[in-house]
Amino acid sequence: MLSQAVVRREVDVIIIGAGAAGIAAGRHLQTVRPDLSLQILEAGAHIGGRALTVRPKLLARQPVDLGCGWLHGAQTNAWTSVAGDLGLAVDQTPAPWSDGGRRLQNDEAADAAIGDFFERTENYRGESDKPLSDLLEPDNPWNPRIEAIGTYLNGAALDQSSLLDYANYAPGEGPDWRVREGYGALISTYAGTLPISLHTVVTGIDHCSRTSVVVETNRGALTARWVIVTLSTSMLARETIRFTPALPHKIEAATSLPLGLANKLFLRVPSDLDLPVDTQAYGSAKTSATGSYHIRAFGQPIIEAYFAGPLAHDLERAGDAAALAFARDELGGVFGSAIRGDLEFVTMSGWATSPHIGGAYAYARPGAVSARGVLAEPVDGRLLFAGEACSVARYSTAHGAFETGVAAAERIIDAAPSPAANALANES
């Protein structure tokens, strides 16, 4: 499946990026049009992009997801079906924040304030866009909690996030489930026999020709009839790929859809420590700069800390020791100071400084609600774009990325002459 050098220099389809969108596009083409040759180019060292499962020795090789971990809208999530087809275990334990889930802090006043805020966002019918923070009620004591949840959802502060874009968010019906083997493992397993070249950095795309596209990489040039670009908006906005002719509208759209940030910190706790299983807790109700803590997921002796927005940036810059100290302080406030010494650092993500990604998921700046459509629009029918940022309703999710990858593949399938048509043309 993997190669250390670009294998095919001339193919029908090149897919840039081996994340959820790229893998979905490749598998769809491989299944529906096996006659079309393809090559996936991945700049990084692993398959899955922002889905990455690791098995730390400190956790006895228990899989944990440093990136996406929940099958949101599981009953309509394409990855749920894929997991079943691959024989992976889908755990249907209710998410702690959902109906039937277990939360350590239950406060009716907080629930009412949070529910009212998000109901206002869903019911907003104004023609002009504005920051999500404009719908906060002045002096509401639960505003810090609402703002914290907003950072978990968008990866950015409410005053940086588009209200109209959030109002479009619809991850699909059904609860939120998990893959026991890991979401990253699910996507990398689904890659199957796709031809993927790792450590292959694309530096330029020349789409001047009407019949082919030239892709420049650190390992030489390749030529294809179609190219699917699944780069993160951070990489597009930084213009890590040079388009010829230039695509200023794509760069502008990507700049309007920056990647927010969410990071995870995994802590080991003694197996005999009496902590509630599969339970969620917030670190603080007094500030938006607080973590969300998933206690003993799958019954394992671990705590998954989730940091987002400005706090995630601060802790990533400060380093692992600072993040551990922060989590110890917050969890000490929740469970008592004695727990501080029981919390052992295992691993932590750092998506902002991930060299070929640069963040977690794309949020729209106020006034940029149309940018997702602009980003997703094909160029001359030969240059296509996919990824979670291209999804109007399911952005920030791996299944949103999946759907955009399949949609891009379908455009190619519609445009590519069928094998029968090619045979007929050769006979005439």
Image (cartoon, rainbow, N blue to C red):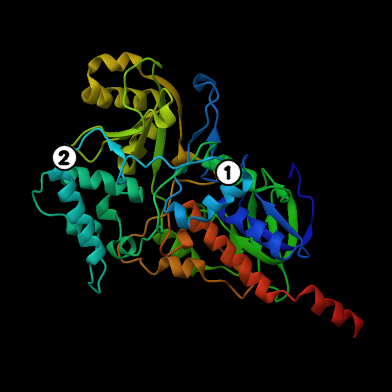
Residue located 73% across and 50% down the image: 195
297 and 369: which is toward the camera: 297
Residue 386 visible, this orientation: no
Can you give x and y, in whole percent of width and height, for residue 94 in the image? 37, 42
| Label ID, residue 296 | none
Residue located 86% across and 77% down the image: 423
Q: Quadrant of the N terminus?
A: top right
Can you give x and y, in whole percent of width and height, for residue 226 in the image? 68, 67
Residue located 31% across and 66% down the image: 367
Q: Quadrant of residue 309?
A: top left
Find disc 1 in the rendering and name its residue: 186
Q: Quadrant of residue 169?
A: bottom left
Q: Quadrant of the C terminus?
A: bottom right
Q: Quadrant of residue 402?
A: bottom right
Callout 1: SS: helix
Q: Is residue 23 left or right of residue 312?
A: right
Three-letter code for the amino acid on which mark 2 is drawn: Asp
Residue located 58% across and 51% down the image: 82
Three-letter code for the amino acid on which mark 1 is drawn: Leu
Q: Is residue 305 above or below residue 175?
A: above
